Image (cartoon, rainbow, N blue to C red):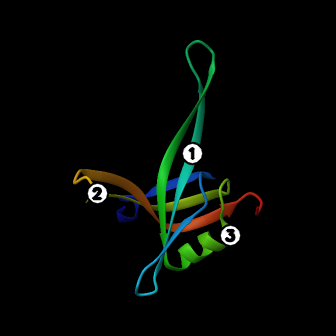
Amino acid sequence: MNTLRNKVQLIGNLGNDPQIFLFENGNKKASVSLATNESYTNKAGEKVEQTQWHNIVFFGKSADIVERFLSKGSEVAIEGKLTSRSYEDKEGDTRFVTEIIANEMLMLGRRA
């Protein structure tokens, strides 16, 4: 059951081209926003569509693959863990960020 702790699985489409960051030690990070869509019928019989946006982060070889093969609109399945962090912005306000650190990715659909 330990493998079920803090596990996130999502299928969605990239909302932007990957943002790539290179660290001084040569490591790479890729960040994307992922849209997941859900639809249901409400009590009035109307179809309702909802989109949720998720911040996804890839490191190392995964970041290389994301940079090379993914772009805005690409459909992917990801698995990872949910993380939260905080930082102080330029005005001195504390900001909170929730991200999914991806450890597996499957490219779906056709290549752009």
Gap between marks 2 and 3, in whole Å? Answer: 34 Å
Tell me: residue 48, above or below residue 20.
above
Dot 3 amino acid type: Phe
Which mark is on residue 90?
Answer: 2
* Viewport quadrant of the N terminus: bottom left
Residue depicted at 74% across the width and 57% down the height: 109
Tell me: residue 75, above or below residue 28.
above
Gap between marks 1 and 3, in whole Å? Answer: 20 Å
Residue picked out by circle 1: 36
- Badge 2 marks a residue whose secondary structure is loop
Residue picked out by circle 3: 69
Nearer-the-camera pick, 106 or 86: 86
* 2 or 3: mark nearer the eye: 2
Q: Measured from the top left, where is residue 41 in percent x and y? A: 60, 22
* 2 or 1: mark nearer the eye: 2
The residue sitting at the top extreme is: 44
* 1 or 3: mark nearer the eye: 3
Gap between marks 2 and 1, in whole Å? Answer: 31 Å
Q: Measured from the top left, where is residue 13 in percent x and y? A: 63, 51
Q: Mark 2 near mark 3, Cβ–Cβ under 8 Å? A: no
Dot 1 amino acid type: Thr
Tell me: residue 104, above or below residue 32.
below
- Numbered disc total: 3
Q: Which label's residue is closer to the chain start, 2 or 1?
A: 1
Res. 18 image quadrant: bottom right
- Badge 1 marks a residue whose secondary structure is strand
- Horizontal side, residue 88 vs residue 77: left or right: left
Q: Residues within 10 Å of mark 3 (few under 14, many from 20)?
A: few
- Horizontal side, residue 104 vs residue 90: left or right: right
Dot 2 amino acid type: Lys
Nearer-the-camera pick, 45 or 62: 62
Q: Which label's residue is closer to the chain start, 2 or 3?
A: 3
